[in-house]
Image (spheres, grey):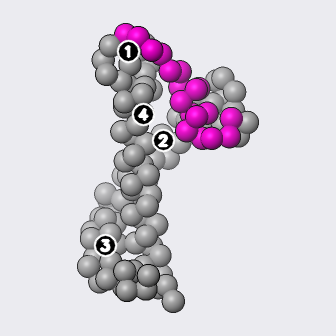
Amino acid sequence: MTTRATRNAQLVRYSINLVHWEEQLSKAVLGDRIEGNSNVGGDGTEGLFISVETYWQTLHWNTEDAGPGKIACERYQDFRNYTKLYRETVEKYDLIKKYVADPWVTYRALKQH
């Protein structure tokens, strides 16, 4: 039986990994276009341009749910705002230390699998 602490640890760990992965991916693909809306790619060169709309629709998988055009861009910005708030909450309440770095939570999670 999975304990609440174990489920919380797994959720926090998964969410932090997902947020970090998306931040690294968007930096590589979009560069600073989310912040400054420039046409420079993630590697700092002019060239292949992937729009925020295309990026979000690809990342989202379901283009209908992601939305078309400006709606897709707004939804992606909402997602980025959410992940920023999540990261700030994790840091404020030290959730990594509380859930992810707690050796007993990790031990119990591993023992049950």
Q: Position of residue 97 (x, y in %)?
A: 27, 69
Task: Return the residue at label 2.
Answer: 81
Disc 4 + disc 1, Cβ < 8 Å: no
Marks 1 and 2 sit apart, C-alpha to C-alpha, by: 22 Å
Disc 4 + disc 3, Cβ < 8 Å: no
Of labels 4 and 1, earlier in sequence is 4
Marks 4 and 1 sit apart, C-alpha to C-alpha, by: 13 Å
Of labels 4 and 2, earlier in sequence is 4
Q: Residues within 10 Å of mark 3 (few under 14, many from 20)?
A: some
Relative to 40, is 80 on the left or the right? right
Q: Which mark is residue 98?
A: 3
- Mark 3 lies on a secondary structure that is helix
Q: Position of residue 80 (x, y in %)?
A: 48, 40
From what the image shows, is residue 39 above or below residue 16? above
The residue type indicated by label 1 comes to Val
Marks 3 and 1 sit apart, C-alpha to C-alpha, by: 39 Å
The structure residue drawn at horizontal position 66% and vertical position 29%, both measured from the top left corner, is 71
Q: Which mark is residue 86?
A: none
Of labels 3 and 2, earlier in sequence is 2
Q: Quadrant of residue 44?
A: top left
Q: Nearer the viewer, mark 1 or mark 2?
A: 1
Q: Nearer the viewer, mark 3 or mark 1?
A: 1
Q: Which mark is residue 26?
A: 4
The residue type indicated by label 2 comes to Asn
Of labels 1 and 2, earlier in sequence is 1
- Mark 1 lies on a secondary structure that is loop
Report how many numbered discs are placed on residues in the image.
Answer: 4
Region of the chain picked out in magenta, as a range: 46-63
The structure residue drawn at horizontal position 47% and vertical position 16%, both measured from the top left corner, is 49
Marks 4 and 3 sit apart, C-alpha to C-alpha, by: 28 Å
The structure residue drawn at horizontal position 37% and vertical position 30%, both measured from the top left corner, is 28
Task: Return the residue at label 1.
Answer: 40
